[in-house]
Amino acid sequence: MKIAIFGASGKTGREIVKRALDNGHTVTVFVRDATRIQEKEGALTVVAGDAHDYASVLRGVQGQDAVICALGSKDLFRNSKIRTNGTSNIIKAMKNCGVPRLVVMSAMGVGESWQALSMVNKLFFTLLMPAAREDHEAQETAVKASGLDWTIVRPSGLKDTTYTGTYLVGENIRAKTSQISRADVADLMLRVLENQTHRQVALTITN
């Protein structure tokens, strides 16, 4: 499968790239800075550009079978709208290029999964991650209205731990530990593509 990965230079994005290449896919990574891509083996193409710029996003989407979006920002208090604008550009490009399948990484606590959070985690989101939540909410709204064949993946707290292959997945499930390995998130995102499952569904992944 030919897969374009946006946000490929981030911590989770790098795990998605590694998993996709290990699984034998032809991968196009879209990044702002091409020097941040360390993978040199496998069927890998690098497209440098700004996700806010539609023309460069279009270059990354052309000729693909599917797109994975893992766009994000380290700024918790200022909404850069990188997820919202970038995902909107991806959706537009996918429609123009006839690419139907989209898998997007969001976060547990966004959309209807807000009700599955504990009071402590709700407070954490409200006080410490207001900009990120606002951006995620707008991103998910765009995805659900896109008309594409989409899946949203909502991880609980992301951790830089090793791949386990053992995790809980479901719609609006409650987290036991509020953490999940980035490698496990990458595994799920590739699985829903490869197995053609969980379409038009937002999934929570936790352990």
Image (tube, helix red, strand yellow):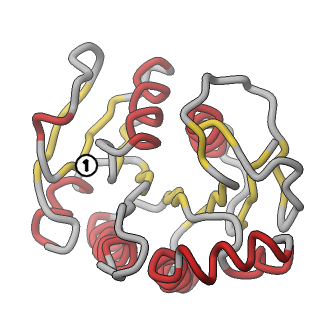
Foreground residue among 28 and 36: 36
* The one of 115 and 94 positioned closer to us in this rendering: 115
Residue at coordinates 26% horizontally, 42% vertically from top-left? 29
Q: Position of residue 13 (x, y in %)?
A: 40, 42
The count of marks equals 1
Depth check: 3 or 140 in front?
A: 140
Per the image, the residue denoted by label 1 is 63
Q: Nearer the viewer, residue 184 or 30?
A: 184
Where is residue 158? Give x, y as percent: 60, 47
Vertically, is 84 above or below 58?
below
Q: Is residue 33 left or right of residue 173?
A: left
Q: In screen coordinates, is 55 left or right of 85?
A: left
Q: Is residue 145 left or right of residue 73?
A: right
Screen quadrant of the C terminus: top right
Quarter of the figure with residue 27: top left
Residue 20 percent coordinates (x, y) = 45, 29
Residue 190 vs 116, above or below: the answer is above
Q: What residue type is labelled 1?
A: Gly
Q: Quadrant of the N terminus?
A: top left
Residue 151, image x, y percentages: 62, 61
Mark 1 lies on a secondary structure that is loop
Category of crowding for the residue at label 1, using alpha-carbon neighbours closer than 10 angstroms: few (below 14), some (14–19), many (at least 20)? some
